[in-house]
Image (spheres, coloured by chain):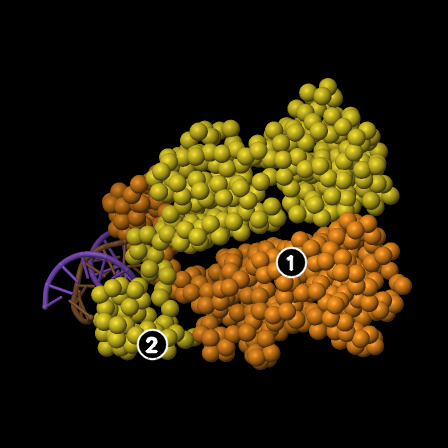
Chain colours: A yellow, B orange, C purple, D brown
Amino acid sequence: MMETTTIKDIARICGVAVSTVSRAINNHPDINPETKTQIMQAIKEHNYIPNNSARNLKRSESNTIAVLIKGITNPFFNNMLKVFEQDIQKKKYTFLLHRVEENEDEVEVALLLEKEKRLKGIVFLGGYFCHSEEKLRQLTVPFILSTGGISEIIDKSKYSFVMVDDFKESYRMVDYLCKLGHKRVAMIAAPPCDESIGRLRLEGYLKALEDNHIPRDESLIRYLQDETMDIFSMKYGYEVTKQLIASGVDCTAMFAISDSVAVGTCKAIFEMGKQIPKDYSIAGFDGMDISFYYHPSITTIRQPVQDMAKETIKILFDMINGKIERGGRTFEAELVVGQSTRDM
Amino acid sequence: MMETTTIKDIARICGVAVSTVSRAINNHPDINPETKTQIMQAIKEHNYIPNNSARNLKRSESNTIAVLIKGITNPFFNNMLKVFEQDIQKKKYTFLLHRVEENEDEVEVALLLEKEKRLKGIVFLGGYFCHSEEKLRQLTVPFILSTGGISEIIDKSKYSFVMVDDFKESYRMVDYLCKLGHKRVAMIAAPPCDESIGRLRLEGYLKALEDNHIPRDESLIRYLQDETMDIFSMKYGYEVTKQLIASGVDCTAMFAISDSVAVGTCKAIFEMGKQIPKDYSIAGFDGMDISFYYHPSITTIRQPVQDMAKETIKILFDMINGKIERGGRTFEAELVVGQSTRDM
DNA sequence: TTGTACGCGTTATCAT
DNA sequence: ATGATAACGCGTACAA
């Protein structure tokens, strides 16, 4: 193992004090250009790399924004991340992406990161927010929840968030299907235990049915049973749709909880020798690329990803700069009609 | 701003020395259970969180494995990441995912991370490896390159890697198309400047044509021109295929550099009122979920993602544990025939 | 079992 | 312009 060279080594090599080396590294003004170049030279030669832990320990601030993302598997987030990156770098801040496991406590992780990295702000991307106020109060830097579910336990007016109204948008979609004349609309839903957007979208579905005077039929609602399966996977849509059709229940439309799931649903239908939208109308949610590129294109709810990501960063920085105390924004989504739905 | 509580605060509160608190935190054996519970109690109450920077600075080792991923946008990686996570956690190590920008130097980042986090090992996922030996020698911990391109500058026998033979597999696919009777096979390729898997797959394509006595036709090779566009995006396949067809060049098959691109290609064809595989046979690469779930399913080269990921971790740990010096493994991929190709 | 004191690598303050 | 030194928060010999 190669001994790691430290600032002391460089100082010794150059015959100067550590403080001088530090000045050279950090572009301090009061240093002789000659000694500086000499030091930088030695640094290059000996492959010296400052120890970041020591720096963070010592530094008062770091200008980094952390984005905590729950379940990087959700392809929906990818688009947001790009915007985050760009906008954060544009502000000369450092972008730190950190994934948190499904079973991990995101606030706990944030607390750690805040200390370790001297964060300036935090974005919680996705996930479900149901943490006690006490715990959230421990976060000393501004944070914002982006495109995730928020528990009713939490007083929304106290925190910052950017999201769509999953209940309303889900309602919008199912209402649209009903208005097309569909009376038997199935839903490919999240696990029954889901307390987040999964539940909201389910409730939007139920309410839309109710308002259209269609009785609720449990046999039309399919939940994710197999906990090992990914809720945002095509496989889930595929498997459950095969079951649904095989079970012989009568339905003319299916609403999937996400576009990926809808893709799996479509495939299952094709495999059974049925057609879309002739035999079944299919609807998704999110407005991801695949909803457009699938054949047929899939009717979906398009979330304004770009705008939402930009607004997330804007609000966060307004908080950091003390312009506002907090900010919440619910975006309007858009019903994009594709080739996968038809009227009855 | 709330003052962050430190180990000293806890010590003062409990009326003990910092070392005692430290012992309590780190589960040291020689500590009175009573004092320990008392300390843990105080820690809970005051929301004390150890400063990780200080810990890392002090600690000799950390048992964490970093996975550096270049361009998180490539959906192909998602599947590997899951395996990495599982296997690394299974070994009681910490999994650290770190994304590196397209224009960043991954080894540079690794060097920093190694110091900061006291890494035990590093996985470079994707990207293209063309770093000088001198730089690579600076890495003091074992590392392995997984599913990325390796420059010819680099002496493969000196390093560890897990990959497929992109040249061979690409050849396999194009040869298959030729054997089906296709004489005019287009390729949706990477940017011309690509030195990585993009070039390898292109060369496999060219060689297959040659061996099948089909003359090379530049008008059939489409490169990614717009640098702002993502090489692994459906949009790329879509746009370039529209151009290709509009240009009126004669071809009966198209080979896309990845499955995502192939999806875009299919969509463009459908939009032009053509059929697959009747009018065009389409082939992809990678074997991602969508190649199966698309309609029609897309003929592709399936990389054994799971196995490759598992082998990556296995080799890395064998190096960490000193069982081996280095290990390289080239996996065989599989030609999966879908509904998107037909014989002529 | 517990406390004292030092050092990890760096930056910042104060002299010089 | 440069050097000496304290401090950041923690872990750990070593002493008690």
Residue found at x 73% / y 39%:
A338
When asked about the image quadrant of residue B80, the answer is bottom right
The vertical placement of C1 against B198, above or below, is above
Q: Can residue B114 be seen in this view?
A: no
Residue type beneath disc 1: Phe
The residues tagged by marks 1 and 2 sit, at their Cα atoms, a distance apart of 40 Å
Residue at mark 1: B232
Q: Which residue lies furthest to the right in this view?
A: B344
Q: The residue tagged with tag 2: helix, strand or loop?
A: helix
Q: The residue tagged with tag 1: helix, strand or loop?
A: loop
The numbered disc on residue A270 is none
The numbered disc on residue A41 is 2
Residue type beneath disc 2: Gln
Q: Are marks 1 and 2 on the same chain?
A: no
Q: Is residue B60 visible?
A: yes
Percent x, y of residue A131: 46, 36
The vertical placement of A88 against A107, above or below, is below
Host chain of mark 1: B
Give the crowd class for mark 2: few <14, some 14-19, many >=20 residues within 10 Å: some
Host chain of mark 2: A
In the rendered structure, the answer to whether residue B109 lies left or right of residue B344 reads: left
